[in-house]
Amino acid sequence: MRDLKGSALTDRLAAAAEAKAALLAKLKPKPTIVDPLFAEREAMKAADLQAVRAAREVDKALARQVVLDRAAAAEADAAAAEAAELAGKRGARKERKQLSKEEAKAKRDAKYAARKAR
């Protein structure tokens, strides 16, 4: 019996080949439109990145400097407190020496006065 629709083997093979070609055409990469500012855009991104990095480095340097300044100020305060404590101790020692000298002189004067009174 003859096929009335005309779907002979060659017709079916041709239709399958056309379907396969259409499927492959769908999967083919489409030509892209090249951005005319592509290179400039990359340069701008690089410049922005460099500016951000430089700003961060400046911020880090400022933070480090603040920490160093605080440490130096604390060290200076400690040194000033130590110097004040030393000055206080020296003053007290001088007073004690002065009192000792005065007591020794008073003792000596009393001793000489006792000799003269004899």
Image (spheres, rainbow, N blue to C red):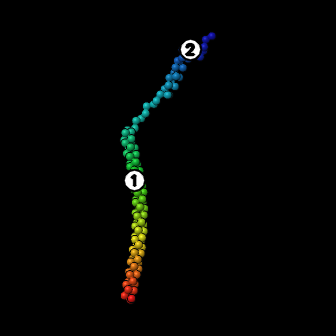
Q: Identify the image quadrant of the C terminus.
A: bottom left
Q: How many marks?
A: 2
**Quarter of the figure with residue 89:** bottom left
At 39% across and 39% down in the image, what residue appears? Answer: 38
Seen from the viewer's position, the closer of residues 91 and 99 is 99
Name which residue type carries label 1. Answer: Ala
**Residue 61 bears which disc, if any?**
1
At 41% across and 80% down in the image, what residue appears? Answer: 103
**Residue 9 bears which disc, if any?**
2
At 40% across and 81% down in the image, what residue appears? Answer: 107
x and y percent of residue 64 in the render? 41, 54
x and y percent of residue 76 in the render? 40, 63
Q: Mark 2: which secondary structure?
A: helix
x and y percent of residue 6 in the render? 57, 15
Name the residue at the top extreme. Answer: 1
**For the residue carrying disc 1, how many other residues have a C-alpha within 10 Å: few (<14), some (14-19), or many (20+)?**
few
Seen from the viewer's position, the closer of residues 83 and 57 is 83
Name which residue type carries label 2. Answer: Leu
Q: Are marks 2 and 1 in contact (CB under 8 Å)?
A: no
- Please say if 45 is above or below 17: below
Q: Mark 1: which secondary structure?
A: helix
- Please say if 55 is above or below 14: below
x and y percent of residue 24 in the render? 50, 25
**For the residue carrying disc 2, how many other residues have a C-alpha within 10 Å: few (<14), some (14-19), or many (20+)?**
few
